[in-house]
Image (cartoon, grey):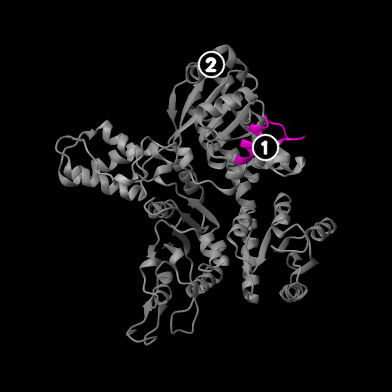
Amino acid sequence: MKEQILIVEDQFVEADYLRLLLEQAGYGITGIARSVAQAQEMIRTKKPDFVLLDIFLKGEETGIDLARILAVDNIPFVYLSANSNEDVLNEAKQTQPYGFLVKPFREKDLLVALEIARYRHAHSVDTKYQKEIAFRKTLEAIRVETGTWEQKSLQIIAALQRIIPFDFLVGGFGRGFCFLRIGFDEYQIMGIPELATVTGQSMEALSALTYNCNLTFFKKLFAENFQLRSDLEKDLSICLYSRRSTAYTADQVEIFERIVPLLIQSIDTLLQDKAPDMVTPASKKSRQIPDEIIGKSHLLLNVFDHVAQVAPSDTSVLILGESGTGKEKIASSIHQFSTRSGKPYIKLNCAALSPGLIESELFGHEKGAFTGALDKRMGIFERANKGTLFLDEVGDMPIELQVKLLRVLQEKEIERVGGRDTIKVDVRIIAATNKNLEKEVADGRFRLDLYYRLNVFPITLPALRERKEDIPALAYHFMRHFADKAGRKLSGISDGVLKKMMTYDWPGNIRELEHMIERSVLLAKGAVIEEILLPAFNKREKPPEVEDMTMKTIAENERDYIIAVLKKCNGRIWGPGAAAEILNLNPSTLKSKMKKLGIKKEYIH
């Protein structure tokens, strides 16, 4: 007997059809629920292995409300819906489903979707425990190795970063010290004297850090001085911070809670063996990043973390970002650091192909399949077998071809145009687009089920205006490159030019910056670039705040709005004129939202 499945669908005919298909395929059915309340009752009676879940149900609560409950209970679910409203899709995506089936669907689509959901769920659980086991082994290896306190502590921090990304780590341990991330596997270690210098606080005020690093005073102090927006805590001795809001997932919280005792024990052991006499900047270079990717902003470091995390697996990756942000370089990096690095890496620009030839280009054709097909030809999928296929601008793929691509991804086999035989293929897919695929789905130009199939591991690249701290490093990199290419000896870029670049929005992102620097190198009259010609209409009076320029998620906007209301109400939740009343929410609902969004009192007052 296969898995037991709960069907949550309020249309009787559709629900019964699903039951029939699943039972014929050998699945067990725990029940058919037509509302969230009925589904919860059935789950209490018998916990299912999977849930097939329609988004729109009878009653006030939707399938998305139930999905949040299922996620907490670690019950995998697959959405069923004919609705592709952009707001609904955004909300559904936040619940991290294991699949999405668009009505109407074939029997094979349903069964393949369940197989994929089963694999993804098992893989996510296995990966979670494999990471934890690997971390424990790393700590044990570090313990028996020879090395200084600084070297060993940096090894521990780098190992922790691989499973729970952070920008700032605070430890008490009777001494008080912090690790500030300054690059990829690079950290600055600070003790209380260094913190006093950076924050302007007295040594006496910071002394409590030695026994309790989670005091509200410290959280507010670190948030203000290091631009931190979320934190993860378990013990009085250790706390992680991130510059991204809502940075930590439920899985990461769970792993952190389990490894904290071992982490504390390892650091305590190091301190007992040899405490640090002085605290200095240091780095641990255990992982690699491509030389052509320039920058150390926290947004770019987050991208590197995702690349390092996903590269060794065969998981599909969807790279999102504006034109010119470097999507192709990130795709190449994922392949370079994967187990398929010695195999073919094929790039296909979906926007540049003729609609009449794209199917032949992807799947190949037999001789005589169409006019002009004089020979049999292998398609891109066959040529990329055992390797990686990069589908650039996948958002421009014709809707009729999206169906065929989806089936190849699900069934891992193709048919050449004009052919009858199926050909098995083993290809890792990396897709990229500068389009808002949720909007494309809502407008009917992109299939929802293909979106979810590609969106297994999304990586969003920040626009250059969102990481302006990287502009000087990028500018000097391009200056050296084009100066060498042109046979010119340039020593630098003037402060005036750098200021101009920092005030510009860079709508063309890194590609535009590259072209501007190339032009400036050719026009430079001396050894220093003294002038850069930027479009006048896009200049600003002063540099914009990077945080203000950042495109925020729905959850981030909701978090900011709730914080703003709470500040107006001096942190009051209950009573007349309090936050709950202004937001038109039940006070308990508001408290739940605050907990979910990581809103704490130290960020309000």
Q: Residue furthest front?
A: 577
Between the C-alphas of marks 1 and 2, the distance is 31 Å
Q: What amino acid type should be assigned to the residue bearing mark 1?
A: Glu
Residue occupying image coordinates x 51% and y 24%: 149
Q: What amino acid type should be assigned to the residue bearing mark 2?
A: Gln
User: Which percent across, then down, holds residue 95?
Assistant: 65, 53
User: Which percent across, then down, holds residue 448?
Assistant: 57, 65
Q: Which residue is mark 1?
A: 257
Residue occupying image coordinates x 64% and y 72%: 103
Foreground tag (1 vs 2) = 2
Give the extent of the magenta segment: 561-578
Residue 171 in view, yes or no: no
Judge whether residue 440 is colored magenta.
Answer: no
The local secondary structure at tag 2 comes to loop
The local secondary structure at tag 1 comes to helix
User: Which percent across, then down, holds residue 275?
Assistant: 54, 18
Contact, CB < 8 Å: mark 1 with mark 2? Answer: no
**Which one is nearer the viewer's eye here, 445 or 75?**
445
Local crowd at mark 1 within 10 Å, few (<14), some, or many (≥20)? some
Quarter of the image for the C terminus: give it: top right
